[in-house]
Amino acid sequence: RQEREIAKKEEARRKAEEAQRRKQEEERRKKEEEENRSSEDHDNRILKFSERFGMAEKNKGEGNELFKDGNCKFAAERYVKALGHLAKLVHIESTMKEEDFAQAKALKLTCYNNLAQCFLKLEAWSKAADNCSAALELDGANAKALFRRAQALVEQKELEKAAEDCRRCLEVNAGDKAVEKLLEKCERGIKAAEAKQKKMYGKMFG
């Protein structure tokens, strides 16, 4: 009976922590939406693929230069702007060729991965993970997105999920030392947490 009560308390604590995390994520999303609304470019023109894609590429290139200079916040803004241009291609999809779709997808994937890297540098772990997830929706076996999401998840103490991303990444990119090192860190953390929990229960019932 005592064991059940302790288990219930532990479950209640986990649920409370999860609720708090979701609340914080919701607050971050709302703030991000407000920032996006305030920075809208109101560019509703129907442009040719080459023109709109060229704008997106230009923004991506600007983002790359800013990132190289260490200006991660402004680099992220350029990548977001590039994605905004790519989103507007929906208005001309009927006129796009197969290679146009492929080019747009590749650029979108790059922008999401670059955004994730910016947010890792800015220690915005949730945003980094979200952009990696967006990249993985486009390419489920993208090694960069898997590794960067694992990095963000480690910082969020989601070690089991991070370890899973590391394993998936190694399936794609076997022998990657950085990924192997991160996976080892995850596994050590998981074992330590299990040992700590076992010790806690041992004290209670020992």
Image (tube, helix red, strand yellow):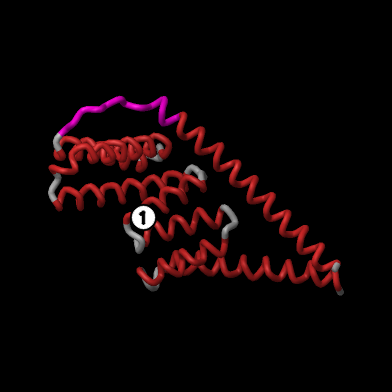
Q: Nearer the viewer, residue 201 or 46?
A: 46
Position of 98 relative to 171 (above/below): above
Give the left or right position of residue 18, taking residue 33 as reference.
right
Q: Nearer the viewer, residue 115 or 40?
A: 40
| Residue for point 25% across, 27% down | 44
Q: Position of residue 90 (x, y in %)?
A: 24, 40
Give the left or right position of residue 34, taking residue 60 as reference.
right
Q: What is the secondary structure assignment of the residue under circle 1?
A: helix
Q: Which residues are magenta?
A: 35-47
Give the left or right position of residue 142, taking residue 25 as reference.
left
| Residue for point 20% across, 49% down | 101
Q: Nearer the viewer, residue 135 or 170?
A: 135
Looking at the magenta stretch, what is its main secondary structure?
A: loop
Which amino acid type is marked by label 1?
Glu
Q: Quadrant of residue 50?
A: top left
Q: Quadrant of the C terminus?
A: bottom right
| Residue for point 35% across, 27% down | 40
Q: How packed is label 1: few (under 14 Cα within 10 Å), some, or many (20 or more)? A: few
Q: Position of residue 154 (x, y in %)?
A: 55, 57
Q: Quadrant of the N terminus?
A: bottom right
Q: Is residue 14 magenta?
A: no
Q: Which residue has dot 1 on it? A: 137
